[in-house]
Image: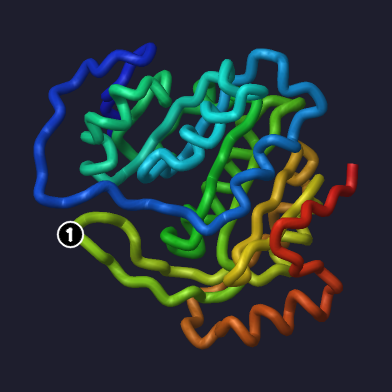
Amino acid sequence: MLKKVVDDYSIIAPIASSALTPQGASASPKEVIFHILQDNSQDVDVLDIGFGTGGLGKLIKANPATAHWAVDGIDGFDVNCNNQELFDSKTYRNVWHGLAQNLPSDQISKYKIICLLDVIEHLSAETAKWLLRTLLTCMGDDSFLFISTPLWFYPQDQMQDGDLEEHLIGVPATSMMALIPRMYSINAPLVGGFVYGKQSLDFIEFFQPTSDKSFSFERGLAVLNAINCQYKPGVLFRYD
């Protein structure tokens, strides 16, 4: 079930106090967001799935070239959806408490850029495959899907009760490159950001994450090197 918390920059649900703190900082190369479109001056609707502490939204709003973009967010961790300070900053236009799996397809189709930053590794392999297929299927023909994930089984457990922070899968670089990205960049420690268009749906069967916790950094790096994928933090590689 989805619960709307913020509507048109106004808080519409009671904000609950908690001893827990918002979670969800990302090591992903978030700055890729500024290079997806040829013209950032247009009006752009962005969906930030698993917005966490709001790092992506803040980054977009802090850049004069994209400050006019409208950013919506959805997150499954209750505390993230009760962040009074974040919502008072008017960073997010609309916010829902719930899981991306519950977003209706007609909602997904409205966005020019859909962001799934450091989210899929928190899902089971089957759920991750289903979610990527669903997003690619429902998004517009000229929309983009921006995904980041560790390219190995990065060990991480729950930090606070109910925070959804545990990592359940690792994603080899072969899976991300087989979806035919438009561009990519890889940060330390081997966290890749990839941008896809609608045509990546034709290659979705090749997305094969693993639940094997022995899929180490070294093994992830070996896979990356085997397919000549570039690991140069701060550098963006494009194919379009």
Residue at 47% from the left image edge and 34% from the top image edge: 58
Residue 64 screen position, x and y as percent: 62, 23
6 to 126, vertically: above or below: above
Q: Quadrant of residue 135?
A: top right
Query: Which corner quadrant holds the C terminus?
Result: top right
Q: Residues within 10 Å of mark 1 (few under 14, many from 20)?
A: few
Q: Quadrant of residue 195?
A: top right
134 to 130, vertically: above or below: above
Q: Which residue is mark 1?
A: 161
Residue 95 screen position, x and y as percent: 36, 27
Residue 11 screen position, x and y as percent: 25, 18
Which residue sits furthest right?
240
Numbered label tally:
1
4 to 51, vertically: above or below: above
Q: Nearer the viewer, residue 222 or 138?
A: 222
Residue at 64% from the left image edge and 63% from the top image edge: 187
Residue 71 screen position, x and y as percent: 50, 25
* Residue 110 can be seen, yes or no: no
What amino acid is at disc 1? Answer: Asp
Residue at 47% from the left image edge and 82% from the top image edge: 213
Residue at 60% from the left image edge and 46% from the top image edge: 30
Query: Which corner quadrant holds the N terminus?
Result: top left
Q: Does residue 81 appear left or right of residue 74 in this picture?
A: left
39 to 234, vertically: above or below: above
Q: Dot 1: what SS?
A: loop
